[in-house]
Image (tube, rainbow, N blue to C red):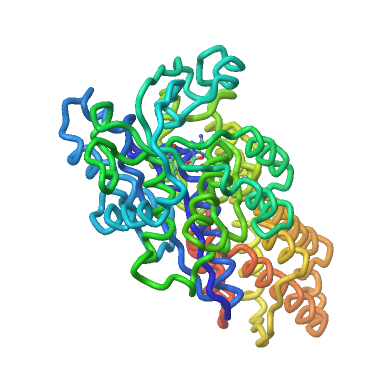
Amino acid sequence: MKNIYITTAIPYVNGAPHLGHAMDYCLADTCARYQKMLGNNVRLQAGTDEHGGKIYQKAKDLDVPVEEYVKENAERFQDFIRQLGVEYTDYVRTTDSDHERRCQEIWNKLKDHIYLEKYEGWYCAGCERFVTDKEYEENHGICPDHQKSYEHLEEENYYLRLSDFKDEIVRAIESGEMEIAPYYRRREILKLIADSPDVSISRPREQLTWGVPVPGDESQVMYVWIDALSNYITVLGYPEKDIADFWPAYAQFVGKDILRFHAIIWPAMLMGLGLPLPRHLISHGMVLADGQKMSKSIGNVVDPVEVLNRHGLDAFRYYFLRHVDTFADADYTAEKFEDAYNNELANDLGNLVQRLATLAKKNNFEMDEVELELPAEYKQLMDSFEFSKAFDYVWDKVQNINRRIDEEKPWSLAKNGESEKLKKCLTGLTNELLTVNMMLAPFLPTASEKIKAIFTNPIEPPEQPLFPKS
Ligand code: MSP
């Protein structure tokens, strides 16, 4: 049994959760459930990122005290995470006093790599990111993700001397000590590291009060990303607790838009603290609305709770884990969601369960105890975080069982009194379904539980279809 630590990006609470936020949770939870199925001891972190200018401004615009505003939205995120069936073990709010104190201790430990200097340049409040002149020019002064003009800043900031760590980070990525999935993002990141100047890691308090105070300097607050990235270890109790049982993380899930923070600033911080780097950084694609990233700042978001309520949790997880390619961007449309539900979940899986359970009951068939094994191909895909491909592989098996029923025609065997053949046929089909169901468990936890209960002796077909058609 191994200890496995899995993390999710902590969303900004400048609004309610949207569909895009579901990706981190669906993927990380699937990974966690799979690891538990293998017998490992899993910790899964989640939380909310509650500081920074973007949130502060939003609360101000709404004329709500910022503490109240973040509390309310943090609760909405917590509800949402629970509704998604995420089995998290650790939860952090970056406004927790323990987190803030630990961040300050982290800052103090990094002191040898921090210096004060004037910053003159650009900032995207949507990304909460300092933008280089080169990027400013390439994007003609407008953030492509948020469609807003970059702000010009001229202020005194603390900097993290990235140059102390660059070579080591490149080595860690090239040697595979810290693996980036998908593999093709590696090159992009290596190029970004080469071009990265030292990073600004604080803001003057007169510009922004809503952040963790820099220890020993009243006039500055920490840059929100320093505070946010620290969550992955403060939630484990670092620095006062020994975190070696779970750190380094096995897998950190992030959207591709924030991979750069996790592949550059985060490793630099960890190296400065003398901590090992995560084993895997997995960057998923974006859920798009009409070809554009779904984002609160753009205002093209879809309410995930509405989608969840349409056909329940399994239908939601089915769509976002199978039809949204794990690594690529994908459009969400209500039509595609409905089609996937009716044609695949209801027709392929729901009908299969109904059909096979009815056949078994009608013929008084009882299953023998068997040791089920996970197919090597499935394991290989799950181990390399290719979740949508693994799900495709399982679905192929679902369709294959349907085909086998049509070909082997157990009803004819029954009619002709070929009881030995019938038993063999139903044994083969139910064992195959149970293997498929085991593979489905990390993706569709509730349906998988139901199917397991149905195919426990005596086999009883469900009274209601597993996935009623809409
Ligand atoms: N607060 C930072 C993360 C700090 S982690 C130390 C942040 N917040 S966010 O709310 O903008 O995004 C949270 C997560 O949701 C990120 O992994 C991000 O990539 C993901 N997504 C946000 N919009 C998304 C889509 N439209 N589609 C898929 N994932 C998206 O970044």
Query: Which part of the image, by quadrant, shows the N terminus?
Result: bottom right
Identity of the residue drawn at 48% across and 72% down: 244
Identity of the residue drawn at 56% across and 79% down: 456
Q: Position of residue 338 (x, y in %)?
A: 55, 38
Residue 175 appears left or right of 223: right
Q: Return the residue found at the far top.
A: 140
Q: Position of residue 407 (x, y in %)?
A: 84, 62
Residue 121 appears left or right of 157: right
Identity of the residue drawn at 78% across and 59% down: 400
**Residue 395 is at least partly visible in this image:** yes
Q: Is residue 315 above or below residue 378?
A: above
Q: Is residue 92 above or below residue 38?
A: above
- The mark tally for this picture is 0
Q: Return the residue found at the far bottom.
A: 369
Q: Nearer the viewer, residue 65 or 82?
A: 65
Q: Nearer the viewer, residue 456 or 56?
A: 56
Residue 222 appears left or right of 298: left
Quarter location, residue 342: top right
**Residue 394 is at least partly visible in this image:** no
Q: Nearer the viewer, residue 429 or 240?
A: 240
Q: Position of residue 334 (x, y in %)?
A: 52, 32
Quarter location, residue 355: bottom right
